[in-house]
Image: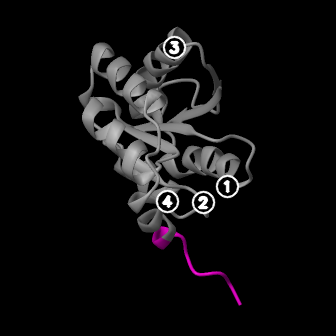
Amino acid sequence: MIIPIASDHAGFEAKELAKKALEKLGHEPVDYGTHESDSVDYPDFAKLVATAITDGEYERGILICGSGQGMCMTANKFPRVRAALAWSPEIAALSAQHNNANVLCLPGRFLNEAEISRIVEAWITAEFEGGRHQTRVDKIAPPPSE
């Protein structure tokens, strides 16, 4: 699967590690930036991945900033994006299984390489369980515009 990925400066190093984790799992990361550790505004990069998900260009994406919060808040403003902040493999898996999260947000300043690898693997391999969870996910979507 092709997975778009982006970070701000605080998540840059973690993004590079997440890309390695994706490749190890047989996926192809598409890097939307930032490409260095100079200060940037996280919404600019969150919007790139969220737009690609909203437009149906990709099914899933990953966003990383210092806390993961800013990326998650920004991404969740976009239609059809269900971004989840995960700091453990269990949270990542549940976000996919119960919430059908299609964007994984990571707190880059708080995770080491092994943790990033385990979280990415848990999220990417987890499958949405549907059923009662689908009913709840359907309620997340904004009402159709009139």
Q: Nearer the viewer, mark 3 or mark 1?
A: 3
* Callout 4: SS: loop
User: Which comes sooner in the sequence, label 4 or label 1?
Assistant: 1
Distance between mark 4 and mark 1 Cα atoms: 10 Å
Amino acid under disc 2: Arg
Is disc 2 in contact with disc 1, using a CB cutoff of under 8 Å? Answer: yes
- Residue 9: image x %, image y %? 45, 32
* Callout 3: SS: loop
User: Which comes sooner in the sequence, label 2 or label 1?
Assistant: 1
Circle on res. 54: 1
> Magenta stretch?
139-146
Looking at this rendering, what residue extends furthest in the top direction? Answer: 24
Q: Nearer the viewer, mark 3 or mark 4?
A: 3
* Callout 1: SS: helix
Q: Which residue is mark 3?
A: 25
Compared to 52, does 36 lie above or below? above
Classify residue 94 by image quadrant: top left
122 or 113, which is in the foreground?
A: 122
- Graded by Cα atoms within 10 Å as few (under 14), some (14 to 19) or many (20 or more), the crowding at tag 4 reads some
User: Which comes sooner in the sequence, label 3 or label 1?
Assistant: 3
100 or 62, which is in the foreground?
A: 100
Classify residue 106 by image quadrant: top left
Circle on res. 80: 2
Q: Nearer the viewer, mark 2 or mark 4?
A: 2
